[in-house]
Amino acid sequence: MAVLNKIRQRSVFLIIIIALALFSFVLADVIRSGGFSSQSSQNTIATVNGNEIGREEFARDVENFERNMGNQMSTTQAVNRIWDQKLREVILDEEIEDLGIRAGEDQITQLVRTQMAGNPSFMNEAGMFDENRLREYVANLKESSPQAYEQWQSFTQSLAKTAKINSYYNMVGVGVGATLTEGEQAYKMANDNVNLRFVQIPYTSIDDAEVKVSKSEIKEYLEAHPSKFEREASRSLRYVVFDETASEDDKTEAKEMLSGQKSSRVEYNAAIGGNDTIPGFDQTDDYEEFVNNNSDLPFRGQYLFEENLNGEYADTIFKLNKGETFGPYEENGYWKLSKVIEVKNIADSVKASHILLPYAGSELSQGTTRTKEETKALADSLVGVIRKDASQFAPIASEYSVDTATKDQGGDLGYFGPGMMIPEFENYVFENPKGSVGVVETDLGYHIISIDEQSDAARAVRVATLAREIEASETTMNNLFNEVTKFEISASDGDFNEIAKKDGYEVKTVRDVKALDENIPGAGAQRRVIQWAFEDGAEVGDVKRFDTNNGYIVAQITATNPKGLMSVEDASAEVTPILRKEKKAEIIKSKLKGSTLDEIAKNQNTSVQNADAVNLNSPTLAGAGAEPEVVGAVFSLKKGQVSKPIAGNKGVYVAELVSKFEAPKMESYKAFAQQESMARRAQATTRVFEALKNKADIEDNRARFY
């Protein structure tokens, strides 16, 4: 009681202390997240020239896109696709608004006409688009379905936006073209050509060891060419993958469980209040039911020929007699027992035709009101007609069949083999002789089937396979978790590589992972790992464990590279060969002696080569490859003149102009100017958007949310 009284006496003091503690906690969180004003950034995917792209709208668009794609792409891929759309939309909308571009009613109407041109609801008797029918349709929507009318307005608004963008690109296109002088240049570049002789001294003639490139030289090159070596922020990682695999005990247990299903077993049956004998794989009369109830793989009941039976033990299984069993055997992560349940000589391919008659309630009822009994009676009646006169099959198929893919071809299904049709259909065509006509019921309705052709019969088997998947047990998974956790703790406190090496783990490395990357080479899609590496506060040396679909990955950050100019070390692999080539060119030039090609070739222990009919559009030298610098220099020479040494792509060249062919002058170069204009306009839309994007002030926060 004394303690409670003291607490009551100091209650106000305690409340103040608790309030201060809570305030300091909140304040610390605010400071970490960038201050009180950062709340909007938590709901903003990006800002483009001050325009915000909201998180909720963006997420909704990503979700809709994934749904429309049928989940055939990852979330990261969908995010990038929507990002490209949003970025283009915001940048172009801003540009269009600044220019005051508006969409006229005629433009929108034309786009609507283009979109609806193939819709029969808006065509007149002549098969032409009728604008009055469209207006009538829209008026009815407005009166009868406000929701549908709202969707129509949204559709026309999107068309208006498209019309504005088209107007903008048309304006850009009008401003892009080529003059007659540029047309003449294009004509001459394609048609003027030269014949030349040349000597090539390849860069490989100088050993790399003779040419040293210093860090200071690489740094100077980077500073002189900054735009080529700008990079995004990146991280380098090393990691160990721990796969969740079954142990030998797990494999043995799975094999024993499968073997236990081979023979009958006695179990207590609560329904009868006593023991009951459960038939095993060897005793069952219904293999399909037994396999589907007891196997980790479904029953496949079709007949298989020798070439259709796959797997390491296919030959052994195919040669079994009816009733014989093979196994247990291990295959593709399963223990299996396979039993041949039927052996028959059947055709390996059949050509058949069918007429599909659905009934009310069947999968392809298509609004039919015929009952099942009425449809069966109709099918039997039509079969009677066909059996009397086989030529009636095609006309009946055209009139009655609902299979739109075959009805106009007389119901012809072409050739097919076992396993390609619905089981009931397949059983009929492979178990009856050529020329048979009959009725078969499936979930689709009633089929009238005609067996038109059959190949020669061959041995086929039906195999029932009981399978048990080899999976990691709970004990194995717990042991793996303990193993991974132990490594994570040890690697956090010590040397990642040394600890992994001591424990026998393979360490993999990856360099320059970007913030929006999804895949880690060697580990697949590991978006969560990349997000962690870019989190605020993540530092070099940090270690963390992540769950994967098949186990775990333990990763460590080994380097953090900020956005900006590449470091000398990172750029070395790209810049060193460039500087080395430049230095080799100077060394080669200093060694060249002689005033003629023959003298130079003799001094360099090489030969003079020839190249004929070379033009500036295709500056390729036979035996040397593309050398635009060399060809351009030769075009400036006079006949018989020898060039100064030229540093090319693959070596240093000295060339001599043998002859020059100048294409005859034309009265007008308008056609070439137009051709050049078209080529430039084709690139204009892409290039203008890239220019706008490079100019835009973009703050991209996608990596925070995805």
Image: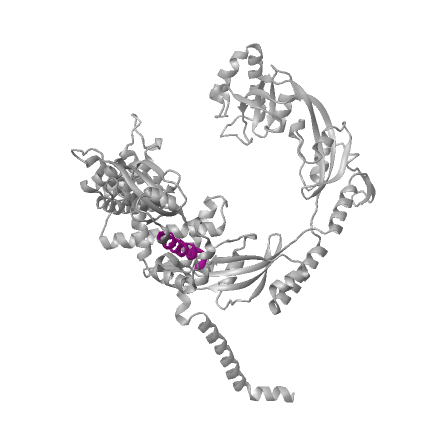
Q: Residue at x 81, y 38 (%)?
A: 263
Q: Would residue 341 be found to the left or right of residue 142 on screen? A: right
Q: In this picture, which residue range is highlighted in magenta?
A: 571-589
Q: Is residue 562 above or below residue 262?
A: below
In-front residue for pair 411/657? 657
Give x and y (percent) for residue 271. 78, 43
Residue 12 image point, x, y percent = 52, 86
Residue at image location 57% in from the left, 53% down from the top: 523
Q: Nearer the viewer, residue 449 or 584?
A: 584
The answer, for residue 112, to whether it is visible in the render is yes
Q: In the rendered image, which quarter contains the N terminus? A: bottom right
Please, what is the dominant secondary structure of the magenta stretch?
helix
Above/below status of 631 relative to 237: above
The magenta stretch spans residue 542: no
In this rendering, would 564 be left or right of 266? Answer: left
Q: Residue 496 in the image: state x and y as whole percent.
A: 60, 64
